[in-house]
Image: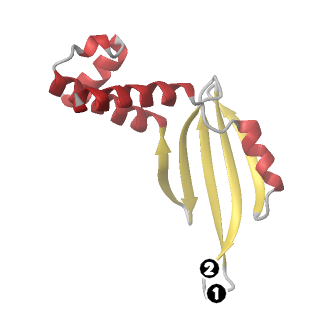
Amino acid sequence: MEYLNELNKIVEELIVFDMNSGITPIELASNIYEEGYSEIRMSKRFGLIECSVFFYDTEYFSDKKLKYEYQYSYDIDNILQEIVQIQSKKRTLLWSRKEERSKLITNIYEMAKIVNINIGDLLSMEDIRQVQSQMGS
């Protein structure tokens, strides 16, 4: 019964995750009024929206300011897809909708096997194909 409750919680997490579009480009642009933000750029590439937010941060024990860029990528429906931090030309993926969703689906798949529930009763065929391709099935 405990596994079934856990499975239900993960399915609910996936539903909430899919319903949450993240911060919108307009909300992101309004951050220009926040202290420390120096520039916000928006561009449209291949039908997708890319927003870059720039700010400077002072290092501890130094007067040197470091320039940070956070790049937000959106799909055609203004749903946040990923966030990348760029500092000194080094790109670091901070968050990816695809990766986070994949983790949830994999957790559902694993838990469904434990409680012996047909995965088709919980996930769409597209989600099932995604899990199978990740697991090499």
Relative to 101, does residue 36 appear above or below in the rendering?
below
Q: Residue 12: image x %, image y %?
A: 43, 26
Crowd class of label 2 (few under 14; some 14 to 19; many from 20; radius 10 Å): few
Rendered residue at 22%/13% (across/down): 118
50 vs 26, left or right, is left
Is disc 2 in contact with disc 1, using a CB cutoff of under 8 Å?
yes
Residue kind at label 1, given as amino acid type: Ser
Quadrant in the picture for residue 8 = top left
Comparing 93 with 119, the one in front is: 119
Relative to 95, 117 lies left or right: left
Give the percent coordinates (x, y) of residue 26: 76, 37
- Name the residue located 60 percent from the left edge and 83 percent from the top edge: 60
Q: What amino acid is labelled 2 in the image?
A: Glu
| Residue identifier under label 2 | 59
Q: Is residue 101 left or right of residue 17?
A: left
Q: Position of residue 112 (x, y in %)?
A: 22, 23
Q: Secondary structure at mark 1?
A: loop
Left or right: 75, with 136 as reference point:
right
Quarter of the view holding residue 88: bottom right
Q: Residue at x 59, y 28 (%)?
A: 75
Front position in the image: 34 or 38: 34
Q: Residue furthest right?
A: 33
The image shows residue 1 at horizontal and vertical percentages of 22, 27
Report how many numbered discs are placed on residues in the image.
2
Label 1: how many Cα within 10 Å (few below 14, some 14–19, many 20+): few
Above-or-below relation of 85 to 128: below
Q: Return the residue at label 1.
A: 62
